[in-house]
Amino acid sequence: LRLRAAVGESGVQPDPLAAISRVSYAAYFVDGQVQPGAAISYLGNPKLGPERQNEFETGFDIDGLSRRVRIEMTYYDKRSHNALVTEPLANSAGGGSTTINVGSVRNWGYEALLTAEVLQSRPIDWTVSVNASINHNQLVSLGANVQPFYAQFQGLSLIHISEPTRQAENS
């Protein structure tokens, strides 16, 4: 029997250029004439900070039948804060996008692995492994002054604060 546990913290730094606004040049029609122009294509965010993750993991490994059968069980709990999200800007604001820090997400679950050495002989070794996992995702908060915005991918994603995320079918 082997018991194990780990605690860690990590982060993701934003792109250094994410603090700087960028301009795209384009041609516009004014009074039937083509005129040069410019528009903001990316709105910089000088207050952008790193995304942070904290994780706790614990579990055990146990061997049996002369080490021919092995069971591994793991529980994990990971929390992410200040996620780096690219937010689209309204066309009325010039379009484009910006990067913001938003909300908190919790991801936790269980993993199990069963490994059995079925056959051990000189010409042939046969090992069978079966694994299973249960994973939960929870949107804890969107953060202060953040309105949800939606993207469509194989259905509509519904956001419920403090509830596990749910998937709805297209109607």
Image (cartoon, rainbow, N blue to C red):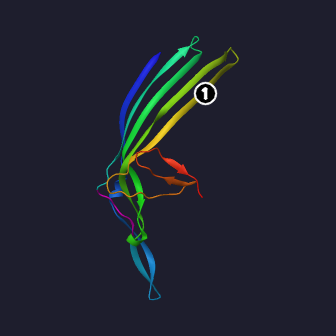
Secondary element at tag 1: strand
Residue 75 appearing in the image: yes
Q: Position of residue 127 (x, y in %)?
A: 64, 22
Give the residue at x 44% y 45%. Answer: 163
- Hey, which quadrant is residue 3 in on the image? top left
Vertical arrangement, residue 82 with respect to residue 171, above or below: above
Q: Left of 119 or right of it: where is 91?
A: left
Q: In the image shown, does 137 or 101 lie closer to the viewer?
A: 137
Report the magenta residues as a range: 40-46
* Residue 41 forms part of the magenta stretch: yes
* Residue 118 forms part of the magenta stretch: no
Q: Position of residue 79 (x, y in %)?
A: 39, 40
Return the residue at label 1. Answer: 130
Give the residue at x 35% y 36%. Answer: 9
Say which quadrant the C terminus sits in. Answer: bottom right
Give amino acid for label 1: Val
Q: Left of 92 or right of it: where is 171?
A: right
Q: Position of residue 53 (x, y in %)?
A: 37, 40
Give the residue at x 42% y 79%. Answer: 36
